[in-house]
Amino acid sequence: MSDQPRRPRTSGKPYRRPKKDPVRILAFEALRAVDERDAYANLVLPPLLRKAREKEGPEKFDARDAALATELVYGTLRRQGTYDAVLSACVDRPLGEVDPPVLDVLSLGAHQLLGTRIPTHAAVSATVELARVVLGDGRAKFVNAVLRKVAQHDLDGWLERVAPPYDDDPEDHLAVVHSHPRWVVSALWDSLGGGRAGIEDLLRADNERPEVTLVARPGRATAEELLEEDAAVPGHWSPYAVRLTEGGEPGAVAAVRDGRAGVQDEGSQLVALALASAPLDGPDRRWLDGCAGPGGKAALLGALAAQRGAMLVASEKQTHRAGLVAKALDGNPGPYQVIAADGTRPAWRPGSFDRVLVDVPCTGLGALRRRPEARWRRRPEDLEGFAPLQRGLLRTALESVRVGGVVGYATCSPHLAETRAVVADVLKQYPDTDLLDARPLLPGVPDLGEGPDVQLWPHLHGTDAMYLALIRRTG
């Protein structure tokens, strides 16, 4: 007898090993990590791509491979809600009964068919080959059958079939068309203040791939130095911001490798700059970042403080995140201190600081461009979980600043329950405070609303949807 393993019997056709497509296999692995481990794509994908670039032979990635893998992962995650609606119309059972790995392959196929310029036959055949490799021949047949149904219409054709008419149910229509959970659509709409055009522009912006934005840390690097990089252009608003317009690799920038510059959304830069520019009554020697992890704002604040001879204390509750803060601040030109402390149980005396920033933990609904999977993980009840912490941190900040000093309350969420509601509730307990008009402290930035607080938006400012309220202690 032959020692060769038996090949599966087929209907008269010779057995063919599935072709391994390294790009699509990597994209599938990334989606499985996001689903199984609640990982974030922006943390999972870079090491996978790095490993693929270091391989030898046909599986080694070039720049085009990396770009395609990135598009497949992020595009699938961003449009998951839309693709789920389409797949539901093409599968003969509820999607909840489809095994998650199979659903990931189907979603990857749907994105190639409906969200890219990959030819239909290539999208179907490549996805079926992927299914044969990662799922087996039996499930590959199911994938093939479903994707052939998906391929019968383009995206607009499917949206006409699966999205309810806007006039019948505006929120559900927008949720399906723009791939956001209905409750998120409702919350963002409330924050914007109504109007169809604005909410559609915002939801579209959430589904666009954001540019990589760098920050030149004052006293250590300059924007001019960063602008010498390929495809680098100035930021929109921050004098320290530089954008990499063609998806450049930050790790290839010498100033980033050295810690003299960092990756930081321009909205985060503006929050730090506004706090640093707020007018004070009295001395300006001690600054506090009360929620400093992972360290981007702390590094910018520390550099700005150093220019004035001030000291920054960066406090972070979680020890490992405090380590990230220390790494970001390493080499700061002025004095600083990093401590691991609970911001609601301060390790310092009341009234110790002249300026205090609390960028509080939140739902992250303002950064859905960068973390598209967050929209599917968050639930309305998460707001209740964050509320006590947000209020506690703001109370501590107000008690930590001296009379005449300024507190900046910031959050990467535009949800009213995490922004104005928190500030209004806490200030009822602190009558000796004034809300400062933050708008003049963001010079040149348009569409900042009626004030005195500031809400930035992806569709208006090209930033994450950062919120900032500036509060002065008056007594």
Image (cartoon, rainbow, N blue to C red):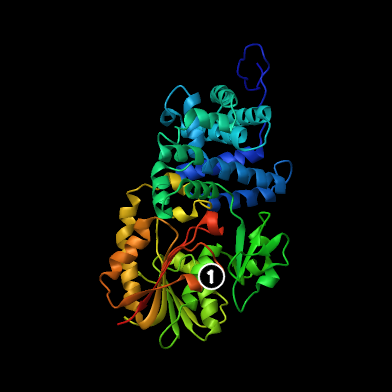
Q: Quadrant of residue 30?
A: top right
Q: Residue 137 appears at what percent x and percent y?
A: 58, 23
Residue at x 50%, y 27% (from the top left corner): 161
Residue at x 44%, y 30% (from the top left corner): 95
Q: Nearer the viewer, residue 256 or 374?
A: 374
Residue 25 visible (yes or no): yes
Query: If the image is split into quadrants, where does the C terminus sit?
Result: bottom left
Q: Residue 238 appears at what percent x and percent y?
A: 58, 69
Residue at x 36%, y 62% (from the top left corner): 420
| Residue type highlighted by circle 1 | Lys
Q: Nearer the viewer, residue 262 or 459?
A: 459
Residue 274 in the figure: left or right of residue 219: left
Q: Quadrant of residue 24?
A: top right
Toward the left, the furthest residue is: 429
Residue at label 1?
A: 327
Query: If the image is split into quadrants, where does the N terminus sit?
Result: top right
Q: Residue 37 appears at what percent x and percent y?
A: 46, 46
Q: How many marks?
A: 1
Toward the bottom, the furthest residue is: 282
Q: Nearer the viewer, residue 276 or 221?
A: 276
Residue 111 in the figure: left or right of residue 232: left
